[in-house]
C-alpha cells in the first residue's frame, strides 16, 4: 500500500488525511501550525517538520493549501517539496488547492524539471465531502499515469473527472466556482425580490429548491436559512477563486463575474471574510 503525504491541514486537507488513515494507509502530514495535526497524529499520522520531509517519505504527495502564495511556499520555498531529489523515484505530486492558472502552469513545469509526475486535482464537495471521503476531483495531468492513481484515490473521492493535461482541472475548477458564485448571488437577489412582491420567503425558497433545484440552489437555500457551523466554504476563499477566474479573461467581457466579486468584496469589507460563502445573501 502506497504512503501518503498531506501538506496543509485545513478543512479539506484534514478530511483527506483522515480518510487515508481510515483506509489503512501510512500517512505523513505537515501544517504551518503543527497543533492542527494533533487529532490526526492521535489516529496514527506521522507529523513532519517540513513539506520536504513529508514528501520525501511518501509515494503520493497531496498539497492542500489556500492560495498561490501558500502553495508556492510549500513547493518552492525553503524545505519545500521540490527540494527533494526525484530523479530515481516514481512519486506523484498532486495540488488540490484552487490556485491561479499562471501558478499551476508554472508549477507543472517546475515538477517536470524535477522529474516529479504532477497532477492538478482541485476538489469540489466541500467540508462534508472531504470528511466523508466523497470528494469530486477535477483532474489535469498525464492520462495514463492518472489511471495508475485511480485505485488510491478511492479513499477520498466518489468521482474523478478528467479534463486533460496538467492545468486543465484547475481551469475547470475556476469556471465551476465562477458559476456557483453567480448562482448563489442570484438566489439572494430572487429572495429579496420575492419580499418586494409580497410572497412568503420560505415558500419561495422551498419551491426553488425543487425547481430549478440542483446542488447549488439547495445548498444556498439551506445555508441562507441557517448559517452552517462549521462553514462549508468561506467568503474570502470564493472571492480569491473568482479573482483568479477574472485574471484569465484576456479581454472577454464578464459583467456577472464583476458584480459577484463586488458583492463578496463588500462582505469582506464588512468583516465577514471567514463567514460561509452564502453570507452575501444576508447582507
Image: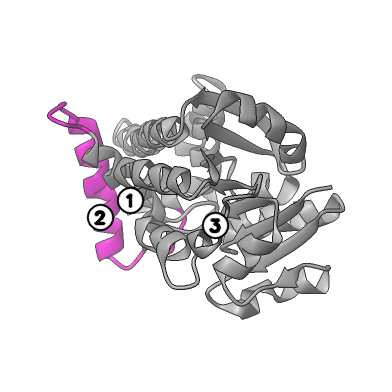
- Estimate the x, y position of residue 234 in percent, counting from the top left: 45, 56
State the SS at label 3. Answer: loop
Residue in the foreground of this view, choosing between 71 and 234: 71
Residue furthest to the front in view is 88
Check contact, mark 1 vs mark 2: CB within 8 A. Answer: yes
Mark 1 residue crowding within 10 angstroms, few (<14) / some (14–19) / many (20+): many
* C-alpha separation, residue under disc 3 versus residue under disc 2: 18 Å
* C-alpha separation, residue under disc 1 versus residue under disc 3: 15 Å
Q: Residue at x 72, y 76 (%)?
A: 38
| 179 sits left or right of 247 in the view | right
Q: Residue at x 63, y 74 (%)?
A: 36
Q: Earlier in the sequence, mark 1 or mark 3?
A: 3
| 259 sits left or right of 37 in the view | left
Q: Residue 256 magenta-drawn?
A: yes
Bounds of the magenta span?
A: 249-276
Q: Nearer the viewer, mark 1 or mark 3?
A: 1
Q: Earlier in the sequence, mark 1 or mark 2?
A: 1
Mark 2 residue crowding within 10 angstroms, few (<14) / some (14–19) / many (20+): some
Q: Is residue 229 visible?
A: no
Q: Nearer the viewer, mark 1 or mark 2?
A: 1
Residue position marked by numbered label 1 in the rendering: 239
Above-or-below relation of 235 to 257? below
- Estimate the x, y position of residue 11 in percent, counting from the top left: 59, 59
Quarter of the rendering occupied by the C terminus: bottom left
Image disc number at residue 261: none
Q: Is residue 42 visible?
A: yes
* C-alpha separation, residue under disc 1 versus residue under disc 2: 7 Å
Residue in the foreground of this view, choosing between 37 and 47: 47
Check contact, mark 1 vs mark 3: CB within 8 A. Answer: no
Image disc number at residue 265: 2
Mark 3 residue crowding within 10 angstroms, few (<14) / some (14–19) / many (20+): some
Amino acid at each position: 500500500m502506497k504512503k501518503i503525504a498531506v501538506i496543509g491541514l485545513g478543512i479539506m486537507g484534514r478530511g483527506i488525511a483522515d480518510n487515508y488513515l481510515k483506509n489503512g494507509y501510512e500517512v505523513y502530514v505537515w501544517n504551518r501550525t503543527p497543533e492542527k495535526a494533533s487529532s490526526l497524529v492521535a489516529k496514527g499520522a506521522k507529523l513532519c517538520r517540513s513539506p520536504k520531509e513529508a514528501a520525501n517519505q511518501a509515494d503520493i504527495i497531496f498539497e492542500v493549501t489556500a492560495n498561490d502564495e501558500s502553495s508556492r511556499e510549500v513547493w518552492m520555498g525553503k524545505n519545500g517539496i521540490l527540494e527533494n531529489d526525484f530523479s530515481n523515484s516514481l512519486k506523484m505530486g498532486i495540488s488540490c488547492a484552487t490556485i491561479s492558472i499562471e501558478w499551476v502552469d508554472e508549477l507543472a513545469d517546475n515538477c517536470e524539471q524535477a522529474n516529479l509526475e504532477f497532477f492538478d486535482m482541485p476538489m469540489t464537495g466541500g467540508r462534508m465531502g472531504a470528511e466523508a471521503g466523497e470528494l469530486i476531483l477535477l483532474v489535469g495531468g498525464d492520462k495514463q499515469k492518472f489511471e495508475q492513481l485511480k485505485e488510491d484515490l478511492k479513499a477520498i473521492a466518489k468521482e474523478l473527472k478528467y479534463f486533460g493535461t496538467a492545468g486543465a482541472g484547475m481551469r475547470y475548477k475556476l469556471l465551476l466556482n465562477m458559476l456557483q458564485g453567480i448562482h448563489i448571488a442570484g438566489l439572494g437577489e430572487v429572495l429579496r425580490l420575492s419580499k418586494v412582491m409580497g410572497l412568503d420567503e420560505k415558500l419561495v425558497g422551498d419551491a426553488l429548491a425543487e425547481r430549478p433545484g440542483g446542488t447549488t440552489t439547495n445548498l444556498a437555500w439551506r445555508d441562507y436559512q441557517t448559517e452552517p457551523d462549521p462553514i462549508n466554504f468561506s467568503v474570502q476563499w470564493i472571492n480569491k477563486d473568482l479573482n483568479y477566474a477574472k485574471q484569465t479573461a484576456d479581454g472577454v467581457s464578464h459583467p456577472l463575474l464583476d458584480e459577484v466579486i463586488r458583492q463578496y468584496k463588500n462582505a469582506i469589507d464588512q468583516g465577514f471574510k471567514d463567514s460561509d460563502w452564502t453570507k452575501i445573501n444576508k447582507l
